[in-house]
């Protein structure tokens, strides 16, 4: 393999991308650099891991709500009741997954300041991929790292 090709492959591996899609008008692929270009928040958090005890970290990144709102979910933003059937599925590279409800992060409902972290303890997450940060959680299991996909789903009516 030529040096330039090897370098290109290394660069491709070193820049993780998140697929943001589902019931949104503007699906996209986002790098950690894209997330860093949005307004940033910081959170010093503590969470308990069932296997390794209490962990303390400082995370920085945009609010998940801001990033998802920019993708224009398929609801009328002016109608609060429209948003209540929407779910958010967050997947990590290793298959670890969690669901949030839209209402959980909506400023009119649960107002949880959930972040899509671009850095943990001042170490950038550009190659690992962003990490979900839920300061309200006691347990660490929803802090999905190496996020590869975020899917918005407004299909609650399909379940009935
Ligand atoms: N992708 C991914 N993220 C994950 C997990 C996992 O298995 N895969 N485990 C979770 C669990 S159970 C905990 S407690 C925290 C641990 O985070 P830490 O090792 O950075 O303290 O990561 C969470 N995020
Ligand atoms: Mo854990």
Image (cartoon, rainbow, N blue to C red):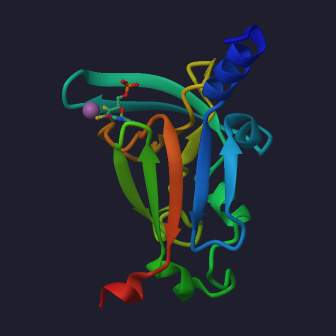
As drawn, 99 above or below 77: above
| Left or right: where 74 falls relative to 70 | left
Which residue in the rendered view is the most extreme toward the front? 1
Residue occupying the point 56% across, 19% down: 121
Q: Position of residue 116 (x, y in %)?
A: 58, 43
As drawn, 19 above or below 139: below
Q: Position of residue 114 (x, y in %)?
A: 53, 49
Q: Nearer the viewer, residue 104 or 96?
A: 96
Give the quarter of the image for residue 55.
top left
Q: In what quadrant of the picture does the N terminus appear?
A: top right
| Left or right: where 38 falls relative to 78 | right
Which residue in the rendered view is the most extreme toward the left? 51
> Ligand 1, what quadrant?
top left
Q: Position of residue 120 (x, y in %)?
A: 55, 24
As drawn, 100 above or below 8: below
Residue occupying the point 72% across, 67% down: 26
| Left or right: where 64 falls relative to 146 | right
Residue occupying the point 57% across, 45% down: 115
Q: In what quadrant of the picture does the C terminus appear?
A: bottom left
Q: Nearer the viewer, residue 102 or 43?
A: 102
Count of numbered circles on the image: 0
As drawn, 151 above or below 42: below
Give the quarter of the image for residue 8.
top right
Q: Position of residue 147 (x, y in %)?
A: 50, 41
């Amino acid at each position: 393999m030529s040096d330039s090709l090897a370098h290109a492959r290394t660069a491709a591996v070193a820049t993780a991308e998140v697929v943001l899609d589902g019931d949104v008008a503007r699906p996209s692929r986002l790098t950690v650099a894209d997330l860093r270009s949005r307004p940033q928040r910081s959170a010093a958090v503590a969470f308990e891991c069932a296997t390794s005890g209490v962990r303390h970290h400082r995370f920085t990144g945009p609010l998940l709500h801001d990033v998802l709102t920019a993708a224009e979910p398929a609801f009328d933003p002016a109608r609060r009741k429209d948003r209540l059937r929407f779910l958010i599925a967050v997947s990590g590279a290793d298959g670890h997954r969690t669901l949030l409800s839209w209402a959980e992060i909506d400023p009119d409902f649960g107002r949880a300041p959930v972040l899509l972290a671009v850095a943990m303890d001042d170490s950038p997450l550009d190659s690992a991929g962003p990490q979900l940060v839920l300061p309200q959680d006691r347990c660490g299991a929803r802090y999905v790292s190496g996020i590869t996909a975020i899917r918005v789903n407004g299909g609650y009516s399909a379940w009935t």
